Image (tube, rainbow, N blue to C red):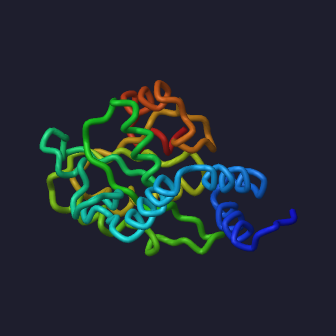
Amino acid sequence: MEFSSKLLENAVNEMSQLPGIGKRTALRLVLHLLRQPKEQTNQLADAIEKMRSEIKFCKRCNNISDTELCEICSNSNRNEEIICVVEDVRDVMAIESTSSFKGLYHVLGGKISPMDGIGPNELNISSLVDRVKEGKVKEIIFALSSTMEGDTTNFYIYKQIQDCNVVTSTIARGISVGDELEYADEITLGRSILNRIPFEASLKS
């Protein structure tokens, strides 16, 4: 792809690094921005810069937040006795869109994957165990994707908290094996949360 402007080429190259954005799509987006009023483009740039410099991670659940505690953790109407364990913030958004869960979350930041060099110490597992040991949590719902890595992570956490007085459950397998939560439709995902099963039962299946 030939460019008449080095500035245009640099912008396209940077845009094409975004997930799912190829060079042609990046060029179309950059040209669209060039056609917009300068003020609108500046607002976009300012929003991205402000997000990158000021965004925080909730000190309790590791969800993306504007403050030390995210809006979910600071909401007094949420059930603090139930924690839904997810891989990343996209899963929180997916579950919240179902309006089927009123507890709290814990974002691991990934899942155990020895092939990728990701072990328990690279994830937010110890902070989850600490939350359980505080004694306020009555149930842990494992809502990781139904992959080998997800199941391995579930089992590792289960072993860490099995001596605590807490119920462990997992979302029902309405989510196909290998599927990521963020791609599940809201009805299926909502039912999987509501129809969750004891984690021990999932070990036998």
Asked whether 62 or 192 is in front, the reply is: 62
Q: Look at 41% across and 43% down and name the residue there.
A: 93
- Residue located farthest toward the left when viewing the structure as drawn: 76
- Residue located farthest toward the right when viewing the structure as drawn: 2
Q: Look at 19% across and 45% down and name the residue there.
A: 81
Asked whether 125 or 197 is in front, the reply is: 125
Q: Position of residue 171 (x, y in %)?
A: 44, 37
Q: Position of residue 167 (x, y in %)?
A: 28, 45
Q: Is residue 46 above or below residue 104?
A: below
Q: Look at 48% across and 41% down and name the residue there.
A: 202
Q: Position of residue 128 (x, y in %)?
A: 30, 62
- Residue located farthest toward the front when viewing the structure as drawn: 37
Res. 156 in view = no
Q: Locate the C terminus and report the quarter of the image it occupies.
A: top right
Asked whether 39 or 172 is in front, the reply is: 39
Q: Look at 28% across and 59% down and name the residue there.
A: 66
Res. 157 in view = yes
Asked whether 123 or 69 is in front, the reply is: 69
Q: Position of residue 68 (x, y in %)?
A: 22, 64
Q: Is residue 98 left or right of residue 29?
A: left
Q: Is residue 39 left or right of residue 104?
A: right
